[in-house]
Amino acid sequence: MRFSLLLAALVLSAGPALAQTPCGGSFSGFVTDLKKEAISQGYTKKTVDNFFASVRQDPRTLKADRAQGVFQMPFVDFSRRLISQNRIDMGRRKAQQYASTFDAIERKYGVSRGVLLAFWAFETDYGAFQGDYNTLNSLVTLAHDCRRPHLFRPQVFAALELYSRGDFSPTKTTGAWAGEIGMVQMLPADIIENGVDADGDGKVRLKTSAQDALTSGGKMLQHLGWKAGQPWLQEVVVPQNMDWSLSGLETIKSTRDWARLGIKPRQGSLANLPASLILPQGRKGPAFLAYPNFRVYFEWNQSFVYVTTAAYFATRLEGAKPYIAGNPDPGLSGNQMKSLQRKLQNRGHNVGKIDGILGKNTRAAVQAEQKRLGLPADAWPTTELLNKL
């Protein structure tokens, strides 16, 4: 299942803006305020009372929200953990089983089958494990929690809208801890915006219909900016005399310019598109060119290691070779990463939350400090950098 929430928290487009229900305080009082807010938006008192009748605060959801240490793993370890031969084989069987569905998705939305297969595999193991959290309880619990209420409060009202249409059960609808539902794990607002009845049964059934789930995922990716017929990630070979400060998502060059710098594709040819050179574990590890579609992945999940792994797995499912792991310098432990993030923050860098995770902001800060200190600026933190700081 998914390891973190979909970050495109879409507010319903119809109707006036919702008045903000403050987070925190008593849970029952918070629910009472949500009910008043819902009624002010035009829902009947009976609908609102029935929708919220069973809602309960879920401590298990809060525990899961705070326990995402898997993202502290480096790319090679993380990708090897998620990508097994069984998942590759199953993905290829699913590609054949639903070939006509994938063909239709590619024609209409321009999303390649490997991309959707990779999400399907990582989110729910091809639908086998969709999560057993009560969706309403999780959404209201996270909306009440003051860590990220702006992401989850709109989803409560989106779930209410689905309920009013007969497409959501407050007691029976289950999914991931962050409120995502179905085989590719979509939040209620995303279902309203992008849900597709692809199997023609009159309902959007993301939990039981692979056709509906995959097609809805394809539509959502197009909505997020996916460009038809364009690649997303390509493994490359990089010369040892490379200016490593050019790596990272902040630097974008044409593939012609990258080729002039000695970048070569491991397979096929470079696309005629702007691209960034990414080195998930520094100059001694795997190397990839990330094309514009790669950035769309961050609208689905903001973890750099998850995004890179999902994008890489999609290429594997479409015939790419296993990456060259190389021999990266040892990374930092979780506590060392937190120490590094504090040092970077003290030097004025915006690293976001001190969480021990090497995300986009921390990578950019690491690279800036490496450059300042005269170290190879490949954005991979080492004990040498930590000690110098």
Image (tube, rainbow, N blue to C red):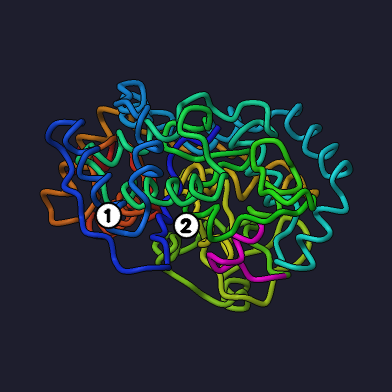
Q: Which residues are magenta?
A: 218-228
Q: Nearer the viewer, residue 174 or 92?
A: 174
Does residue 85 lie above or below 193 as drawn?
Answer: above
Q: Which residue is identified by label 1?
A: 365
Q: For residue 64, which numbered disc appears in the image?
A: none
Please name the amino acid that badge 2 sits on: Glu
Lower sequence index among marks 1 and 2: 2
Q: Which residue is identified by label 2?
A: 299
Left or right position of 291 against 338: right
Q: Nearer the viewer, residue 266 or 274?
A: 274
Q: Helix, strand or loop at disc 2?
A: helix
Q: Nearer the viewer, residue 237 or 15?
A: 15
Label 1 crowd bin: few (<14), some (14–19), many (20+), radius 10 Å: many
Left or right position of 126 against 166: right
Residue 360 image position (x, y, % from top left): 37, 53
Residue 331 image position (x, y, % from top left): 39, 34
Does residue 291 lie above or below 173 as drawn?
Answer: below
Residue 338 image position (x, y, % from top left): 23, 35
Q: Helix, strand or loop at disc 1?
A: helix
Residue visible at 68% across and 52% down in the picture? 115
Give me the C-alpha separation between circle 1 and circle 2: 22 Å
